[in-house]
Image: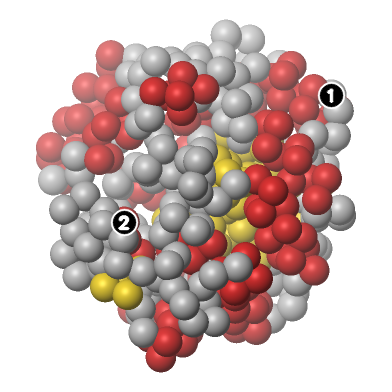
Amino acid sequence: MMLFEPFTIKALKLKNRITMAPLFLGYANPDGTPSQLLIDHYKEMASSGVAMVVVENIAVDVRGMGSPFMLRADDDRFVEGLSVLSRAIKESGALAFAQINHAGRYAYGPERVAPSPVRTGKVVPRELARDEIEGVIDSYARAAKRIKEAGFDGVELHGGTGYLLVQFLSPRTNHRSDEYGGVLAHRMRFPLRVVEGVMDAVGQDFPVGYRFLADEMLPDGFQVEEAKIYGAELARREIAYLSVMVGTYDSFFLPKYKEMEREQGYMVHFAHEVKRAVQGIPVIAAGRIQGPEYASKIIDEGKADLIGLARILFADPLWPKKAKGEIQDPIIACEPTCSLCMQRVMKGKPAYCSQWSKERREAFLKRVEETG
């Protein structure tokens, strides 16, 4: 089964083709440092048998925090806690990557910045001035350098879910008339400058991956044909990998999207489209890849190079070992009609899975109450 064959990203050797895709759970301390709950979660994910773990959604700028309970890398004081986290992951058997992000118009505070003043809920974000754009690029670069100093094996830029990098790419949210808006070549300028700034900050030998939005799933949004052009530009800059996803917070709750995401592998054909456009760059496919046989088929057929498990692994942290036959128990499936984990995060509560055993759920909630 190719799923369990090794793979190389830059100079890093992955023991198999299974990765943990980033999944925000709201476990960080209110001061932006890793809580023991978060560290223990990532120990479990790393010991699951996956080759690589990507820690989710670490803020590069306090104005760009999407939640008060997310990790931060916007100051040197956060390096120590992040070092504890990277060490815990690596000692538990997986490579450790960290995803850095600026939420832009999706930030949780009232003082939001974005490419253009496009209303988000009840808030209209302030348009970033050109000199401020330079500062944001620098924030990404500095945060990436701290990730490297903290001992991670690589960094991932969050270019998905409709966050700031996507907001510049999308004609829905970028209405600028300067060199950062208009045609795709101009809308790409900011995210490409972020990539270049990060790569300069961490050096050529440190892998820089990218959470890649292939389609907003909105008629007036960023769509796959433009995404393939953008992906080719990332490939020219020798991005370490593209972790492909679709949809944003503006489309996640639409009936069409909710129906689509119940299907196994609902993002895989997008990953395949991107892979064909970025020859030679590893592509990670995600999107409810529930069955090991199906996961292996994706690799066998060349639709992607790696598999990304997020909610699937959250529901059953033993998935890789069960898939390999090391554990004979059946895989606990992520329930397609359930969104408990996302619902709790949206309410500012730490996430748990409805498919966990009663004992595990009760122990989790008791721990949250005691530390909370």
- The residue at 44%/65% (across/down) is 174
- Residue farthest along the bottom direction in this orientation: 131
From the image, tell me which residue sits under label 2.
106
- The residue at 46%/28% (across/down) is 257
Image location of residue 1, percent across then percent down: 84, 24
Q: Does the rendering let one see residue 65?
A: no
| Left or right of 98 in this view: 339 | left
- The residue at 77%/60% (across/down) is 232
Image location of residue 57, percent across then percent down: 42, 56
- The residue at 83%/45% (across/down) is 276
- Depth check: give the residue in front, 329 or 155: 155
Mark 1 vs 2: CB contact within 8 A: no
- In the drawing, what numbered circle is on residue 1? 1
Please tell me which of labels 1 and 2 falls first in the chain: 1
Q: Of the residues shown, which amino acid type is indicated by label 1?
A: Met
Q: In the rendered image of this protein, does residue 300 appear above or below residue 47?
A: above
Image location of residue 72, percent across then percent down: 35, 67
Secondary element under disc 2, as helix, strand or loop, is helix
- Depth check: give the residue in front, 187 or 313: 187
Secondary element under disc 1, as helix, strand or loop, is loop
Q: Of the residues shown, which amino acid type is indicated by label 2?
A: Tyr
Q: CA distance from mark 1 to mark 2?
A: 41 Å
In this rendering, the label closer to the viewer, 1 or 2 = 2
- Depth check: give the residue in front, 42 or 22: 22
- Depth check: give the residue in front, 372 or 351: 351
Quadrant position of the C terminus in the picture: top left
Question: Which of the colour schemes (rainbow, by chain, secondary structure, one colour) is used?
Answer: secondary structure
